[in-house]
Amino acid sequence: MSETNNSQPRLAGGIFIALGLLLGAIGGVALNEPSAGMMIGFGVGVAIALVVWLFDRKRA
């Protein structure tokens, strides 16, 4: 197995996808549109996770 000598830990952006789904569903229920809220929350979470991933790629 090959090991990398990267001393910095990798960043995890998956939490933003989960939080986006959860908060989007809660916000959607408040507006009587839970599916739309969930999809919007998912999209926002994925966008934030992609930004974290791109930032982490440049850092390495």
Image: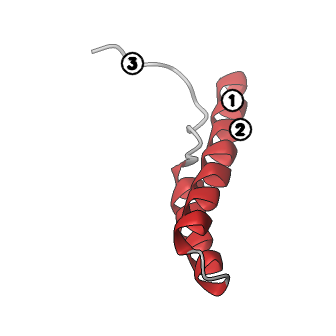
- Residue furthest out toward the top: 2
Q: Between 49 and 2, which is closer to the camera in this rendering?
A: 49
Name the front one of labels 3 and 1: 1
Point 65% across, 86% down: residue: 30
Point 58% across, 47% down: residue: 13
The residues bearing labels 2 and 3 have C-alpha atoms spaced at a distance of: 26 Å
Check disc 3: other Cα within 10 Å, few if <14, some if 14-19, many if 20+. few
- Determine which quarter of the picture holds residue 58: top right
Query: Circle 2 sits on which residue?
Result: 51
What kind of residue is marked 2?
Answer: Val
Query: Circle 1 sits on which residue?
Result: 54
Q: Position of residue 47 (x, y in %)?
A: 67, 43
Check disc 1: other Cα within 10 Å, few if <14, some if 14-19, many if 20+. few
Tag 2 secondary structure: helix
What kind of residue is marked 1?
Answer: Leu
Which quadrant does the N terminus fall into? top left
- Determine which quarter of the picture holds residue 21: bottom right
Label 1 with label 2: CB-CB less than 8 Å: yes
Q: Between 59 and 14, which is closer to the camera in this rendering?
A: 14
Q: Position of residue 35 (x, y in %)?
A: 52, 67
The answer, for residue 57, to whether it is visible in the render is yes
Point 64% across, 58% down: residue: 40
